Amino acid sequence: MSGGVAVARAGVQAGGALGATRLDLAGKHIVLGLSGGVACYKAADFTRELVKAGATVQVVMTQAAEQFITPVTMQALSNRAVFTSQWDAREPNNMAHINLTRDADAIVIAPASADLLAKLVQGRADDLLSLMCLARPIDRCPLLVAPAMNREMWAHPATQRNLAQLRADGSTVLGPGSGDQACGETGDGRMLEPAELLADLVAFFQPKHLLGKVVLITAGPTFEPIDPVRGITNRSSGKMGFAIARAAAEAGASVTLVAGPVAQATPRGVRRIDVGTAQQMFDAVMAAALAQDLFIATAAVADWRPAAFTGQKIKKTAERAVPQLALTENPDILASVARLPNGPYCVGFAAESHDLLQHARAKRERKNVPLIVANLGPETFGQDDNALTLVDAHGERALARADKLTLARQLVAEIAARLAVVAP
Ligand code: CTP
C-alpha cells in the first residue's frame, strides 16, 4: 500500500456500515413462531427485518405469546393473517398445522421459551406451534430456535439437557445473548437482537464451503505514529476485509480478523484482534499463522514507518525548519506467512492504480502466493462496491462489479475450490 500513503492525525477512519438494505432472503418463506416471553416485543422488529431482507413471513403465535404482543401488530408487520390455534377454520382442509410448513424454507421460533423447548424435545403437540413443528417435513424444513428466558431458567440442567437434545435432533439454536434481563437480573438467556437474528438466519442459508476450516484475515489500514498526534496511514476503510471475514464465517469457517484502525462492526461469530501498526499486525498474524488453513491478506499495510517516534508533539515554531521524516521498511506480512514451512494457503490482494494485471502477476510471483486478488485502489477504497480479478497459476478470472459482501461470498467460493484441491 505504499502508493497512497497519507499523513493524518491519529484516530479511526470512518468506514460506515457494510452496504445498505440487502435482499439476502429474497424468495425465502419463513414461518416465524412466537412463544410466551417479554422478548416478543423484539419479534415485531425482527419481522420488519425479515420483510426488508426480501422474505415472506407467516407468523404463528401461542396463547402465551398473545399476552405479550397482539396478532394485530404481527399481521400488520408481516402483511399476512396470523395463526394462533390448531382449530383455526380458515384453512379449507382445517389443517393449518400441516399446510403452514409445506412451502416454508425454515421455521424460526423467536422467542423460544423454556416451556416451548421442552415441548419440542418431547414431541408434544397440544397447541398449533408445537403441533406444526412436529408435523413439519423434517428433511426440508429446518427448525431454528432463539431462546429467551431468565438466566436461572437458561442455566437449569433441564433447559441445557433440552437444548442438547434439540441440537442432536437437527435443530439450530440462535444465541442466546447475555446482559441485562427484563427481570432485573444480568446473565445469559436474552434473546438475540433482531439484526443479530437476521444475520444468523442469512448465514444459515449460505453454502458451507469452508466448513471446519480455520481462517485468518487482515483488514484495514495500519497507522504508523510520527508523534503522539500524527501518523502515516492510508485510505483503506476495511470494508472488503470485513466482508470477507463475514462471508468466511457464513461459509462455516472459524475466523480470526486482525484489523487496523477502522470503524467497522465485527461480523457475527468472528474473533477480532485490533492492532495499530504494521509491526503489531505482523506480530498478531505470525503468532496465529501456523494454526490456520487459510490466510487472506486484505490489509493495506503501510510499507514504511517513521524511523524514529518523537515522544512529544513536534511543534511548529518560527525558528524551526520543516521536519524531515526518515522512513524505515515494515515487515511484509503476507510474504512472511507464505515463507512458513507447512503454512496456510495464502491469498493476497493487489491494490493498484494502473497496469493492474501486470502488477498483480508480478506480486504473485514476488510474494510466492498461489492466488492474488487484484483491484483498482482508487475505485475501491471507502466504496461499498468493487470489481475483482483473480490471478493464479492458471490465468485470470474476473468477478464483475458488485457490492462487497456479494463479491466476498463469490471470492470465498473461489478460494474454497482451490483449497479443496491442495488440502482436501
Ligand atoms: N502486504 C502485507 N504486508 C506488507 C505489505 C503488503 O501483508 N507490509 C500484503 C497486503 O495485505 C496485500 C499484498 O501484500 O495482500 C499486496 O499489498 P500491496 O500494498 O498492494 O503490495 P506491496 O507489496 O506493498 O507493493 P506496492 O505497494 O509496491 O504495490
Image (cartoon, rainbow, N blue to C red):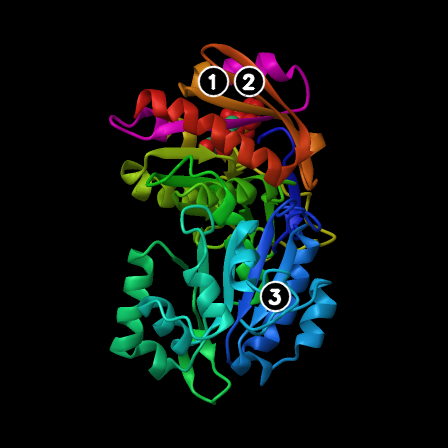
Could you tell me the amino acid type at mark 1?
Arg
Q: Categorize mark 2 by other alpha carbons within 10 Å: few (<14), some (14-19), many (20+).
A: many
Q: Are marks 2 and 1 in contact (CB under 8 Å)?
A: yes
For label 2, being within 8 Å of ligand 1 is answered no
Tag 2: amino acid: Ala
The answer to which of marks 2 and 3 sits earlier in the sequence is: 3
Can residue 331 be seen in the rendering of this structure?
no
Distance of label 1 from label 3 (alpha carbons) = 52 Å
User: What's the mark number on residue 364?
Assistant: 1
User: In front: 407, or 71?
Assistant: 71
Percent position (x, y) of residue 242?
54, 45
The answer to whether residue 368 is above or below residue 191 is above
User: Please, what secondary structure does the residue beneath circle 3 have?
Assistant: strand
- Which stretch is magenta? 337-364
Residue on which disc 3 sits:
59
Residue identifier under label 2: 360
* Disc 3 residue type (three-letter): Val
